[in-house]
Image (cartoon, rainbow, N blue to C red):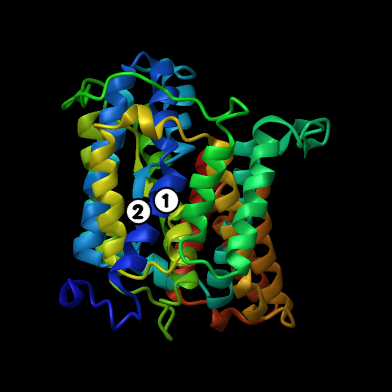
Amino acid sequence: MEKFFKLKERKTDVKTEVLAGITTFLTMAYILAVNPGILSNTGMDFSKVFAATAISSAIATLVMALLANLPFALAPGMGLNAFMAFTVVLGMGHTWQFALTAVFVEGIIFLILTAVNIREAIVNSIPANIKRAIGVGIGLFIAFIGMQNAGIIIGGATLVGLNPDWFHGPAGLAMVGLLITGVLLAFKVKGALLIGIVATTIVGIPFGITKYAGGSYLPPTPYFFPFEFSNIMSIDFVVIVFTFLFVDMFDTVGTLIGCATKADMIGKDGSIPNCKEALFADAVGTTVGAILGTSTVTTFVESSAGVVEGGRTGLTALTVAVLFALSLFFAPLFESIPSAATSPALIIVGVMMMTPVKDIDWNDITEAIPAFLTIIFMVVAYSIADGIMFGILSFVLLKLFTKKGKEVTIMTWVVFALFVLKIVFGAL
């Protein structure tokens, strides 16, 4: 295991890696309940989507572990599942089989783009200061998600606001969990995030917030090749595939950069080790996920929770993959962990991902504005991809109009053009 995962080389050990994997899994286990819940609005069977979610996540994360040797986990992405359910199926009137066909085609295109190194080139083309900003933006983004999941922050007259009842119910439990986890971290307790999740789950029992889900422990079966190829030559199909492709590409790029930055894995030339293999895991997950009956699989931002716990190798991802496979047999148990128990971990991870902000060049306005827009739009637009888009667009335009165009690489120009096409596409 030491030889395969290079534990000593990355200054880690088996215990640290396994704890990191468990932490990552617990912070993203909500997807096992949320993804089937969203896709069942299309008429899909909840238990079959649950099985597809668990199996595709396990396979994609296993590829990440064994090929890329990186501590990142994958699962069907939030946002993309909602786009499939509420826009493609319920909004545009297509069948869920049609939507899954678009996801399948997207996965095949990703495999091709990864094989010819186009996706890796896009990752490497992002300017250094925007790379740092991506990590910070993701930190704020997942902290915001954590606060929303717990009910601390809710919708209101000012778009979002503090829940007036934040000291009661799930929101109050999350605040208790935040205190518990913060104290554990202050005392440098190993596995603080994991212990915090378990402790908060237990505290929620007498208050009726943690409830045993119940149900069968027999593993359900997924769909298998549930596709509809009759309308793939339509304009709708092309637009849907392009949307899935574009959002997934830059969500994954952003997450890889953010988590790799936190793990101190970014090379001096700005590259991520085994980036091609990591992107291959994403492409395999999306393709397999579509075959089994779930929306686009992507690298999960919650992977940073395991990175914060010390995860540095594929052993962390392997642990997550095993737990996803086991979840098929223990669905009621995992569904019993309330979001209020995992939310404090996401908020704490947000704190820890702020460190790259000090390395951003705030004195050069052509670097500072793109970095700031990258950070702020990830939160307010609720999208990693949109944050990167505004960062790249502003970076290129500011460099161009301040006569610093030579600082923009050819590949950055290509990415800029892709974003312009996205804007034009969206306006049509």
* Secondary-structure class at tag 1: loop
Give amino acid for label 1. Answer: Phe
Q: Residues within 10 Å of mark 1 (few under 14, many from 20)?
A: many
Q: Label 2: how many residues lie within 10 Å, few (<14), some (14-19) or many (20+)? A: many
In the shown orientation, is residue 280 left or right of residue 144? left
Q: Residue at 28%, 19% (x, y): give it.
A: 216
Q: Nearer the viewer, residue 243 or 352?
A: 352
Q: Position of residue 271 (x, y in %)?
A: 39, 76
Dot 2 or dot 1: first in sequence order is 2
Which quadrant of the rendered structure holds the N terminus? Answer: bottom left
Q: Which residue is mark 2?
A: 73
Total numbered badges shown on the rendered structure? 2
Residue drawn at the location 43% of the way across and 40% of the way down: 243
Label 2 secondary element: loop
Q: Residue 196's x, y, as percent?
A: 54, 51
Residue placed most toward the observer, 279 or 351: 351
In the picture of the structure, the residue carrying the numbered disc 1 is: 300
Compared to residue 144, the image places residue 229 above or below, namely: above
Residue 382, how many percent across, how many down?
60, 44
The Cα–Cα distance between marks 2 and 1, rounded to whole angstroms, is: 6 Å
> Circles 2 and 1: CB distance less than 8 Å?
yes
Q: Which amino acid, mark 2? A: Ala
Residue 249 visible, this angle: no
192 and 93: which one is in front? 192
Rendering coords of residue 97 (x, y %) = 28, 21
Q: In the figure, 173 relative to 278: above or below?
A: above
